[in-house]
Image (tube, rainbow, N blue to C red):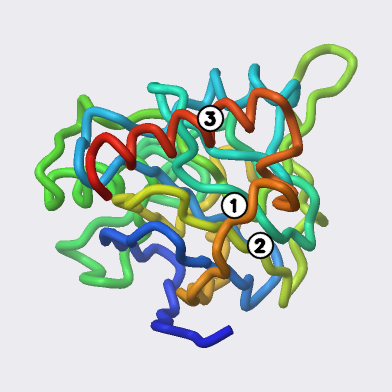
Amino acid sequence: MTTVWSKTINPGDKWSATISKGRLLRFTALRDDANLAMMLFNAFDLTERYNMPDTLKAQYTAHLTRGNVLMSDNGRALASIVEDELGWHDTISGLSTRAGTDTKYGATNYQQLRNEWLHSGYENMAVELVRCGLAIRDLGPVVNLFAKVNCDDEGRMIYDVSHCKEGATVMLRTDMDVLIVLSNTPNPLNPSVSYPASSVQMEVLEAPPLDPATDYCYNFRGENRRAFENTAEYHLLAGR
């Protein structure tokens, strides 16, 4: 597979762009304890976006891994997880906030530290959404790539500090033209008192054509097949 483009997203950085369907997005943790928050939208209709509740409910799971499809609020497949070395990516604990970041790592601001100040996930996403013609009201659930958050017997959400090791990769396939919004900021449940410092490499590659007869994600659940059928119908009617 040929790499079309690559970028390193450093700790605290944010990024967004439109990526066409039929691409592979390979993310690699360049150090331990990475967390890359991600939002997805239909690039041609930004009112359609990643729907966490439907994605989990349709696939009978509370976390994401290979085979899982990231479904939109219109029941379509935005992207699929086609390879995964970690087996668990969090989509229930959300984003870090300004107040939470100040409390955990100490108060910082741009006026004093310029680009060295500690970004929060909420602020990063808000800035990128506005840049893309959206607003804070469009902020919704995110996928926290590389993070594992489990629940104990009392229902408390526990962040697994040993989950992500340097070099771990996860690969997604875009099943629609998507606007992707990323923030390399700490998972809000990470108990570390030091601001995590793992950069993440993102590579875009050409994906082989999807074959419904053999595709792992397509056949992972019956609900996945319906999502892909809805997506194919959308593309047929839209002429894309």
The answer to which quarter of the image holds residue 74 is top left
Q: Is residue 81 above or below residue 68?
A: below
Q: In the rendering, at what x and y percent does residue 192 appear?
A: 66, 52
Kind of residue at badge 2: Val
In this rendering, which labeled residue sits more in front, label 1 or label 3?
3
State the mark number for residue 145.
1
In this rendering, which labeled residue sits more in front, label 2 or label 3?
3
Q: In the rendering, at what x and y percent does residue 153 appear?
A: 89, 15
Q: In the rendering, at what x and y percent does residue 157 appear?
A: 72, 26
Instruction: Give neighbour class at mark 2: few <14, some 14-19, many 20+ (Cα, 10 Å).
Output: many
In this rendering, which labeled residue sits more in front, label 1 or label 2?
2
The answer to which quarter of the image holds residue 197 is bottom right
- Residue 165 lies left or right of residue 144; in this view the side is right
Q: Are marks 1 and 2 in contact (CB under 8 Å)?
A: yes
Closer-to-camera residue (103/199)? 199
Q: In the rendering, at what x and y percent does residue 17 appear?
A: 26, 61
- Residue 239 lies left or right of residue 119; in this view the side is left
Circle 1: element type: strand
Closer-to-camera residue (87/45)? 45
Closer-to-camera residue (198/110)? 198
Q: Is residue 235 above or below residue 152?
A: below
- Disc 1 or 2, which lies upstream in sequence? 1
State the mark number for residue 227.
3
Kind of residue at badge 3: Ala
Is residue 57 visible to the viewer in this orientation of the structure?
Answer: yes
- Residue 147 lies left or right of residue 238; in this view the side is right
State the mark number for residue 170.
2
